[in-house]
Structures are given as structure tokens and as C-alpha cells.
Amino acid sequence: MRREELLHHVILLGKAFSARGMDQHLRDLRVYYLALRHGLTSNKLQLNWSEAFVIEWMKMLRVPPFENSYPVLARGEPCPRCPSTAGSSVSTDCVFPGGARMRCQNCGCEWLEHEAPTWVQRHS
């Protein structure tokens, strides 16, 4: 991915983090943004962030253009791939404000469980 495109994605992800009150993630992302902007990501600078990490967060938070990367299921739903008789074992890979990324231990399928934003719940 071109650096300009990745910078754009980092900005969009920062807005998604900010909207969810994910302040520590936002601070860490800002450091990654600065390093990326100044061409320092290939140096020996110790960063936990990478292009793949940014894209994965965009997928989980459903930030365009990655909003359809994972299927979204209701909380507690079984694996969408395994038959209901398979007794799929589901684990939580990652929890974030408003949802979680789930994984089936049988087949490796991943999906999201998202909660409705609080402003939607209050007005419905």
C-alpha cells in the first residue's frame, strides 16, 4: 500500500478510536502516524503498530473501506460456518468498545459481535 493511502487509513482509524473513547489506542496511533509520515517505520524505532495492525483495527471497527471484512453476528451466535451440531467452540480474540472479534476453534472462522451505539439505543 502506498504511504499516502496508509496515512489516510490511519487518520480514519484515529477518528474511529476517538469516537469510541479509545484514548490509549489513539495516543499510540498518533506516534505511528508521525513515524509513518516522516518515513521512520523501517528504522529500528520500536513500534507495535504496522500497516497490517492498522488495517486489522479498521476491519474490526468497520471503518470504510473495510466495513464488510468480517461478518457481524448477534452476541452469542454460533459459528456461521460450522453446523449447529458440531458444537463449535467460540473464543473471544479481541474486545473493544462496542464489540468483539470472535473465532471458532473448530474451523478458524472469525466474525464480529457489535453492540448498537448508545445514541441509537436511546432514540429507538
Image (spheres, rainbow, N blue to C red):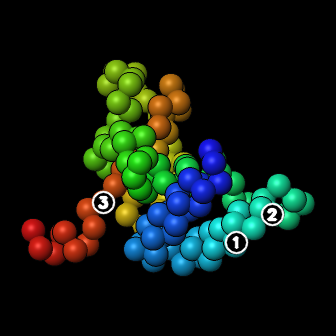
Residue at (47% x, 31% y) in the render: 109
Nearer to the camera, 120 or 74? 120
Outermost left residue: 124
Q: Are marks 2 and 1 in contact (CB under 8 Å)?
A: yes
The residue beneath circle 1 is 34
Q: CA distance from mark 2 to mark 1?
A: 8 Å
Q: Which residue is mark 2?
A: 40
Q: What percent of the width, then of the height, locates residue 53?
A: 62, 52
Q: Secondary structure at mark 3?
A: loop
In the rendered image, is residue 76 in sight?
no
> Which residue is nearer to you in this view: 7 or 110?
7
For marks 3 and 2, give the CA distance: 37 Å
Nearer-N-terminus badge (1/3): 1
Res 3 quadrant in image: bottom right
Which residue is located at x 53 percent, y 60 percent? 8
Counting residues from the N terminus, which is met first, the one under dot 3 or under dot 2? 2
Q: Residues within 10 Å of mark 2 (few under 14, many from 20)?
A: some
Quarter occupied by residue 54:
bottom right
Q: Amino acid at mark 2?
A: Leu
Answer above or below: position of 12 versus 110. Answer: below
What label does residue 115 carry, if any? 3
- Residue kind at label 3, given as amino acid type: Glu
Q: Amino acid at mark 1?
A: Leu
